[in-house]
Image (cartoon, rainbow, N blue to C red):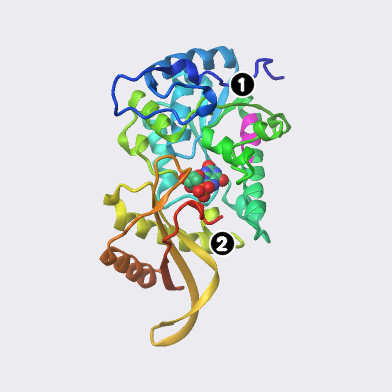
Amino acid sequence: MFPQKAATFNVTMRFYGKAKKASQPMSHNKNLGLEEKQVFDAKKFVENSLKEIRNIVGDCKVISACSGGVDSTVTTVLVHKAVGDKLVAVFIDDGLRREGEPEFVVKTLKSLGIKTRYVDAKAEFFAAFKGKTDAEEKRKAFRDKFYKTLGKVAKEEQIGFIAQGTIKADVIETVGGIKSQHNVLEQIGINPEIYGYKILEPLCELFKPEVRMVARELGLPAEISERMPFPGPALSLRVLGEVTSEKVDIVRKATQIVEEETKKFGTFQNFAVLHNDKATGIKNGKRVYGNIITVRIVDSTDAVTAKAHQVPYDVLRRISERITGEIPSVVRCLYDITDKPPATIEFE
Ligand code: XMP
């Protein structure tokens, strides 16, 4: 049923050359034994990846799970370049995306000439989160639902491979036990064939700055190549405690406000988190026990460490006024000033 070749990509080191421009990012991958002065060569990476993908995939069909983030979009475009219409991009609508995201992703993929399927799995994902409050349990519920949903599409499309945008940091954090990223399976001993397919991870030796270089090399618009990172399990990580569609609506609206007010910052990640606890406040002259939102804005290059951004106070005030004014249930808005470490970027 499956092709015998393993879908591994250990080819990154072939894509490095001597530094020509100081502005090119260095590799962070100490394990590759690269000399300090070596830099990533995105052009070479693309050329070699195309060959490698064609070689691994053979005559099989591939689906690419594309959330619209830079990693999964670069993966999708790369595989499409390699195998053309043998690829179908799949956008799973888990009900956890940012405002307008599903429409944006489907439109972008179609505009790139990629066959695209939209899968509405919102109800199934919310059912999977029912009663789950522990961060890791929630992540595992997401992962399981994600792969089962893809498994159904895989069966319908009769594919051999699923391409996904796993990058080095995902693997390091999962293998290191920091958190189980939803897209890391084989590296922690889960055989993806239980879901009915093999996995193709062309970016799994790259870090975010190199993925962005590949995006630029592929000619993707800045809207994609410079996109703010967004976690696979999406807003489920930003609803503390049990994830429900009502809570996701609150954090989605708060996220939209934070993003609108901080668009010009150029910071690494800007978002809102909905707490599980409630706090006392006053709305329309009445005492209410309402929701708490924390705003998190961080500077980072690779997400491995991060600094809380020094946001001008008037911007923080405006965010707080808008969040408490435009979202009826929210009575309190906080700003997180903790760096990573000791905190992580996300709250879960
Ligand atoms: P943390 O919270 O560990 O996040 O400092 C580091 C970076 O990874 C993103 N992140 C995830 N991405 N699946 C993902 O695809 C996940 O489970 C996950 N958890 C965190 C986070 O947004 C940040 O960019």
Question: Who's the residue at 49% across and 76% down the image?
Answer: 290
Q: Is residue 271 above or below residue 151?
A: below
Q: Is residue 115 above or below residue 45?
A: below
Please tell me in which quadrant of the rendered image residue 38 appears.
top left
The answer to whether residue 231 of the structure is visible from this angle is no
| Callout 1 amino acid | Ala
Q: Considering the numbered disc 1 on the image, is that residue within a helix, a strand or a loop?
A: loop
The one of 135 and 344 positioned closer to us in this rendering: 344
Magenta segment main secondary structure:
helix
Looking at the rendering, the stretch of residues picked out in magenta corresponds to 149-154
Question: Who's the residue at 54% across and 31% down the image?
Answer: 164
| Callout 2 amino acid | Leu
Image spot of residue 108 (x, y percent): 38, 35
Q: Quadrant of the N terminus?
A: top right
Q: Residues within 10 Å of mark 2 (few under 14, many from 20)?
A: some
Image spot of residue 78 (x, y percent): 45, 23
Question: Who's the residue at 65% across and 32% down the image?
Answer: 187
Q: Residues within 10 Å of mark 1 (few under 14, many from 20)?
A: many
Image spot of residue 46 (x, y percent): 42, 19
The one of 229 and 99 positioned closer to us in this rendering: 229
Q: Label 2 CB, ligand 1: below 8 Å?
A: no
Q: Earlier in the sequence, mark 1 or mark 2?
A: 1
Which mark is drawn over residue 7? 1
- Residue 196 shown left or right of residue 72 in the figure: right
Question: Who's the residue at 56% across and 61% down the image?
Answer: 240
Which mark is drawn over residue 240? 2
The answer to whether residue 146 of the structure is visible from this angle is yes
Image spot of residue 133 (x, y percent): 65, 60
